[in-house]
Amino acid sequence: MSDGKPALADWTTGAEAIVYQSCAACGNLQYFRRSFCVACGAPDPAEQRASGEATVYATSLVCRAATPETRAHVPYNIVLVDTVEGFRMMAHGDNDLSIGDKVTARFAQFAGRLVPFFARTKS
Amino acid sequence: MSFITGVGLTSFGRHEGSSSLDLMSKAAELAIADADLKRSEIDGILCGYSTVAPHIMLATVFAEHFGVRPAYAHAVQVGGATGLAMTMLAHHLVEAGVARHVLVVGGENRLTGQSRDASILALAQVGHPEYEVPLGPTIPAYYGLVASRYMHEYGVTQQDLAEFAVLMRKHALTHPGAQFRDAITVADVMASKPVALPLKLLDCCPVSDGGAAFVVSRERTGEAGVRVLGCAQAHTHQHVTAAPALSELGAEISIARAKADCGVAISDVRYAGVYDSFTITLAMLLEDLGLAGRGEAAAQVRAGHFSRDGAMPLNTHGGLLSYGHCGVGGAMAHLVETHLQMTGRAGDRQVRDASIALLHGDGGVLSSHVSMFLERMR
């Protein structure tokens, strides 16, 4: 993302990874990749791979999809999770997840793309 | 000072063969006639957008089509908050002396101009193109996420949410322009097809054809004196992934700013027109705005508080949920209905007292908010 430093590959580019950025100046974490810190404006936040450990914040089971590719997957569960690192992200998850569940990421194919998929953490 | 001097609203539903420009023109003509003005007296035009016929200069396209050469014109895009954002801008424009009569117009053949899939797909693009849209969410899913969290934090149930759909349908029953006019029950809502759980089909507004317009003027043009008392906006995020905590959403911020703008308290309000794209939207906004206590809006619906003859009549035309949702014009119908109520022209939907009204619009996924107080002047 920053000049001369290639961005870490993540699921948005087809790699099995979740990547976030952290700001050396103010410590802010951000998930949507930018060339600057959204909190303080400092350039070149550092990129890191997330562990994939998270807690479910919200869920919505999609039963009506809008394209033939996504329709093939219904019902599929869209979830927002809060990662242990401290940022929130959208992903897929098991259909029976509840808010507050501890979950771990893997990756799955969805409508021709690789997407993060969360299942309950095995204790 | 600014006045809403005229309003126009088409029926919502199917307008086979009508383009977005046709529906905008129809509503605009009604609003200008209602203001007792001529087309040539309109010197400002604000319009929304059309997902069916996107254009980089829709206001100019409309002005040429409609036969007006305004001194000020452009489109505004804030999703579902567009109608009230345009009204707020028109209010400031006439107050600043930029224009005398601003025509605010929205209309779209969203139902018959494209497939439902195309509509759903177009709207899903409010999501983040890299981090959300590839996951296949839909607008109902974005709101479904918010609903699941809201229900979790405040103990709201699916039956609670269903009450809002039932109320909006009850209000639509007596409006000849409403898209849906068959009574429904909570059981019907609960039994309707799952769309993006916890939201089911009857928790979601429909896709409609329709148009709405009003004229905002520096002075009144007739007896009707409905003026903008105060208004404000708040924009906290675009994407639901980046939304703040439920307790920090924009509706609370915009209503606080609007109250500060004009010194009106919620206890002064006699009529409410509140954005209702989904049942959860309405439930949350009523509580964020202070029209109901936290987690208590559904109980207030059951108690008749928001009914036509209740203490705080709400969306008496049926709202987006039952009058229909044609895009920008959808939420503008709330203002049209409010104006009719404030000027005593709502017929058998007329409420006792609509002397001070609160309007609220929401765009995106509770992303952009506009709150506005209107006052009837004698």
Image: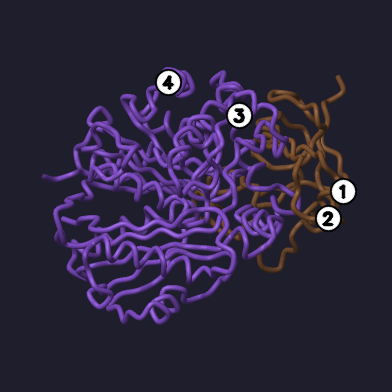
Chain colours: A brown, B purple
Are callouts 2 and 4 both on one chain? no
Residue A97 left/right relative to B186:
right
Question: How far apart are the alpha carbons under marks 3 and 2?
Answer: 29 Å
Image coords of residue B101 (percent x, y): 23, 67
Residue under numbered circle 4: B300
Residue under numbered circle 2: A68
Q: Chain of mark 2?
A: A
Residue B222 left/right relative to B271:
left
Considering depth in this image, is A11 or B252 the residue closer to the camera?
B252
- Mark 1: amino acid: Ala
Question: How far apart are the alpha carbons under marks 3 and 4?
Answer: 21 Å
- Mark 2: amino acid: Pro
Query: Which mark is first along the chain, 4 or 3?
Result: 3
Residue B149 image label: 3
Question: How far apart are the alpha carbons under marks 2 and 4?
Answer: 41 Å
* Crowdedness near tag 3: few (<14), some (14–19) or many (≥20) residues, C-alpha within 10 Å: many
Q: Chain of mark 4?
A: B
Locate the N terminus of chain B by quadrant. Answer: bottom left
* Crowdedness near tag 1: few (<14), some (14–19) or many (≥20) residues, C-alpha within 10 Å: few
Are callouts 1 and 4 both on one chain? no
Q: Residue at x 60, y 32 (%)?
A: B147
Residue A72 image label: 1
